[in-house]
Image: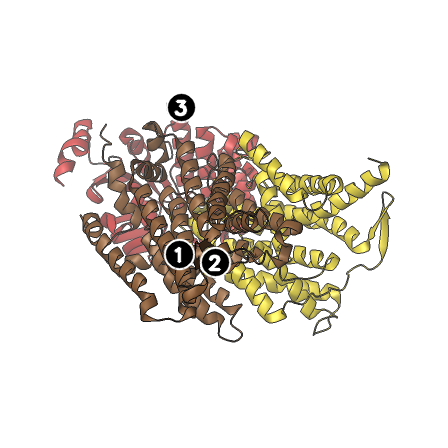
Chain colours: A brown, B red, C yellow
Amino acid sequence: MIARLLSSRGPIVAILLLAVALALPFLSDSTYLRHLMILVFIYGIVAASWDVTLGYTGIFNFAHTAFFGLGVYATGLLAKLGGLDPWASMLLGSVLVAGIAALVAWPVVRLQGIYVVLVTFAFSQLALQFVISQSDLTGGTQGLVRIPTIQLPGYNFLRDYKLGYYYVGLALLGLSVLGLQILVRSDFGLSLRALRDNEDYARARGIPVARQRLKALVASAFVAGLAGGFYAVYLRVASPEVFSFATTSLILSMVLVGGVGTLWGPVLAAVVLTLGSEALANVRGLDEGRHMLVAVAMILALRFLPGGLISALLPRRGAPDRAARPTVQGPTTP
Amino acid sequence: MTDALEVDGLSGGYDDYDVVSNIGLTVGASERVGLFGPNGHGKTTILNAISATLARRRGTVRFFGQPVDRARPQAIVAAGLIHVPQANTVFPDMEIQETLELAAWTPRARAARAENLDRVLALFPRLAERRRQLARTLSGGERQMLSIGVGLMCAPRMLMLDEPTLGLSPKLKDELAQAIATISAGGIPILVVEQDVAFVLSLVDRMYFVNHGAITREIGRRDAVDHDEIMAMYFGAGATA
Amino acid sequence: MTLDALATVLVSGLVMGSVYALMASGLSLVWSTLGIFNFAHGALMTLGAYLAWTLAGSGVLGLPPWIAMLVAVALVAAVGVLLERLLIRPFYGHRAMLLVTVMTTLAATVFLSKGIQLVWGPRLKELPALAPGNVSILGTSISAQEALIVGVAPIVLGALWAFLRFSSTGRGIRAVGQNPQAAQLIGIDVPRLFAIAFALAAALAALTGILIGSVRLVTPSLGDEPLIKALIIVIFGGLGSMAGTIWAAYLIGLAEALLVFTIGIYWAPSTLFLLLILVLVLRPQGLMGKVVR
């Protein structure tokens, strides 16, 4: 019942937020604020898509930031060295990332528990080493610079104080979250949650475990890759920093602080944490310190806010997976 | 003389509900007492509440006069109140002798380690034969022997045994019953949980009937309890309690 | 491959394998006792190396290298106790403890490595060698420091084995790993032994970090790359068995040396990883290991 109440209120909240986001550039023409909001959009997409594997599917996936990072590099390389149109590079880059994700998923979906963590982690660190070692292509530790910007005929996206990038980013966020929302609410999404909550039962009901998990990983990696592509054409640099523990923990803290398995929670937390973290970056001497603060925030969220921000904002809603449970356990009569 | 164990108003359970409530029982200084009743009605939970392995518990527990209801599990073991849990797998990748030596963990137990080890190996010659084997390789009966042996290595001043003969053959049951009688004859009071009424009758001086998380009846040995009455307790009268 | 080259590969594989074995044994100890994977292991290595640098001659306090090493190891063990208390103990019995502690130790990694950058800055530090000079093994000349690593690793691992096998604290650590409930019922203070095991693993991490730092330079990312190798090793060896992990460490060390020799330093890690994926597809429980817990 609470879930129904929420779902009827959900669209209203979403429309309100969307309205605020749409109006924001008219309320302020600060380039810096717009820049921060564009980062919010990007991190929001990455965090929400991570939630699909980590929260809804229950895969202990720690390669998600690497998929994002590979999206940055794939788009950057295709656009800069491949000479491809940046829009097409973004799309092709994310398809490539999805392909790589399928390769990684092949063993991962058959593994259990800690081994999933280890393999996905090892993969993300090797992706980092690979990028650094192929310095002829990627610029090594210096990173890839001067990536071409996206363009429309007769319009340069750098004009109007990043206005174009702002709306493209917002559109990407909206479409991604909408797409992910449709995904997790579909029969496919339902089968993912069934798998997460009771693997043996789901298997007995004929859900192909490995294939469903693989699809979920590929879909969420595609979205992360898209965010990476936009990051590349917006910031015009690709730096190995995107693969670091610090980036992973920043985005992970968004998922945790926002609330695992809620999709909107991580997006909300992306707003709070990106603005907070970037504000701190301007304080002298806090550039390293802010990562330490994010780490502390993450631990505190795990310790004291197990349902995430969203559960604090919307009281009386149980743990997210508990809300999803009855749909799965319904027909268990002997 | 002080009783070995005095329990009064003990309640306990998991998360936010009590499995057992308002339990009161005593075990005399050299007494053998049984807890019996249908499965899933809280016998094991009573032992867990006494040994403090249950997070949620209230009430008073005195061990030889000393209150232990606020003590941590290791303090209760150190005092000599030893709980031998049901179907204990002990430490699967440890050798028998190593396990027994390890079990003499508290300072009091360590002081008596050598003599207790001799006692256990004399009581259970099968363990002596298998002292270099890993615990995971033992049969069900041998594992029960090891589990009781571990309890004895803790230098008990009282033992609480949870279904020591669960799933064993009649022959092995007899063997274990004798061992338990021997332990008790050495002056160690025993509180034993059992479902097998005949078995528990042969073993104890007195017993408590546990039903729906409460003690609903106390039966002395001299009270003639016949089969029908026990059946009534299990299936009839118990439901109204 | 000439005999000379083979000797070079063997010796360098042995050096790397020794470092990996020391590191992986700490990870395996924590896994088989507490049932968690400590991602902060690499950061603890780095911390150990920096503390030793600060304490030793080239740093601030000017202690003799051996003393500095021992003090640094003890300090990192204390940090280990603190980490266990703050990041792991609150989550015992949590229904997703494994995942949660992966995240908290990951946060600890970020906290420690950024803290290290804040305190010691990005400049490289040089640790004084514990054993100066060069020695020749199998006709290959290596630094005495590298020879020391090859020699120290089996001694430390042997001592660890004997501690776990024969000392009563060591036996207690194994007991709480195998059955914490039963351990509690014989009077073992389970959380205390968890803390001891975690501190011991942190001490092993610090020792490994100092040994690496004395053959390379000390950088804020000193522990990162070995951590990835250790991940691969524990996947190959199976986390539950310390012996399997140590064998895998030497095996991966040798395999890596061979790959570096044949296809170069840039491709070796990726090739190793591809091999790993193949192995996992064929044998999901690891090459030698079994899935425990």
Q: Amino acid at mark 2?
A: Tyr
Camera-side residue: C49 or C201?
Answer: C49
Helix, strand or loop at mark 1: helix
Work out how far the residue at label 3 is from the one at label 1, CA to CA, in angstroms. 77 Å
Camera-side residue: B53 or C102?
Answer: C102
Residue under mark 3: which chain is it in? B
Work out how far the residue at label 2 is from the one at label 3, CA to CA, in angstroms. 80 Å
Same-subunit check for callouts 2 and 3: no
Q: Check residue B95 in the rendering and tell me which mark sits there, or answer none.
A: none
Same-subunit check for callouts 2 and 1: yes
Residue under mark 2: which chain is it in? A
Location of residue A227 in the rendering, given as x and y in whole percent from the top left corner: 44, 52
Q: Amino acid at mark 3?
A: Lys
Work out how far the residue at label 2 is from the one at label 1, CA to CA, in angstroms. 9 Å
Residue for point 20% across, 36% down: B223
- Would residue C226 be visible to someone looking at this image? no
Residue for point 79% across, 51% down: C147
Above or below, B165 relative to A253: above
Q: Is residue A2 left or right of residue B95?
A: left
Residue for point 50% across, 45% down: A93
What residue would you read off at disc 1? A169
- Would residue C63 be visible to someone looking at this image? yes
Nearer the viewer's eye, disc 3 or disc 1?
1
Camera-side residue: A102 or B195?
Answer: A102
Location of residue B63 in the rendering, given as x and y in whole percent from the top left corner: 35, 54
What residue would you read off at disc 2? A234
Helix, strand or loop at mark 2: helix
Helix, strand or loop at mark 3: helix
Location of residue C255 in the rendering, given as x and y in whole percent from the top left corner: 70, 39
Above or below, C195 relative to C291: below
What residue would you read off at disc 3? B171
Location of residue B221 in the rendering, given as x and y in whole percent from the top left corner: 25, 37
